[in-house]
Amino acid sequence: FTLRDEQGHEMDKLVYIVPNPATPLVSVPLRSDSYQVLSNKRLSKYVRDGLRSAKCAVELHWATWTPTSASDVEGLVDLVKRKYKLYLNGHNGHAESN
């Protein structure tokens, strides 16, 4: 999912979802500032563990998960919502999700 401005220009990647039925994969790329803020928020243990084990490459922390339950998915949705809100707060609220 990509964040776009009002003219449709790509601004940032919000989340990557690999819909493999056997082992779905969710990856949330986070810049260092967003990583610092989000890793200190109250999130589920499942999400916090994924953030702690995130690999850092190309100036991004690549947090990944393979959700196996509805509560795992709910925690990841909460993380993505928080990332989106952080992005809007830092960019005057002119982003739309795709």
Image: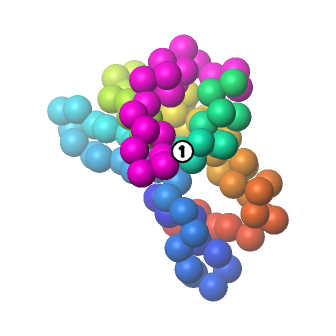
Task: Indicate the secondary structure of the residue bearing disc 1.
Answer: strand
Residue 81 is at least partly visible in this image: no
Check disc 1 and report the residue beneath it: 30
Q: Where on the picture, by quarter, is residue 77?
A: top right
Q: Residue furthest left?
A: 22
**Horizontal placement of 25 versus 60: left or right?**
left
Residue 49 lies within the magenta run: yes
Report the residue at 22% width, 42% height from top: 20
Task: Find residue 7 and report its horizontal and vertical position in percent.
Answer: 63, 85
| Numbered label tally | 1
Q: Type of residue at label 1?
A: Leu
**Horizontal placement of 88 versus 81: left or right?**
right
Report the residue at 28% width, 37% height from top: 24
Residue 17 lies within the magenta run: no
Q: Where on the picture, by quarter, is residue 66?
A: top left
Residue 85 is at least partly visible in this image: yes
Task: Find residue 80 and report its horizontal and vertical position in percent.
Answer: 58, 43
Report the residue at 81% width, 65% height from top: 92
Q: Residue furthest bottom?
A: 7
Task: Find residue 85 and report its horizontal and vertical position in percent.
Answer: 72, 49
**Horizontal placement of 14 versus 37: left or right?**
left
In the displayed structure, 63 sits above or below 57; it is above
Circle 1 packing at 10 Å, graded few (<14), some (14-19), many (20+), is many
In the displayed structure, 87 sits above or below 57; it is below
Task: Find residue 12 and report its horizontal and vertical position in percent.
Answer: 54, 63
**Horizontal placement of 86 versus 58: left or right?**
right
In the displayed structure, 21 sits above or below 70; it is below
Report the residue at 31% width, 38% height from top: 25
The range drawn in magenta is: 41-61
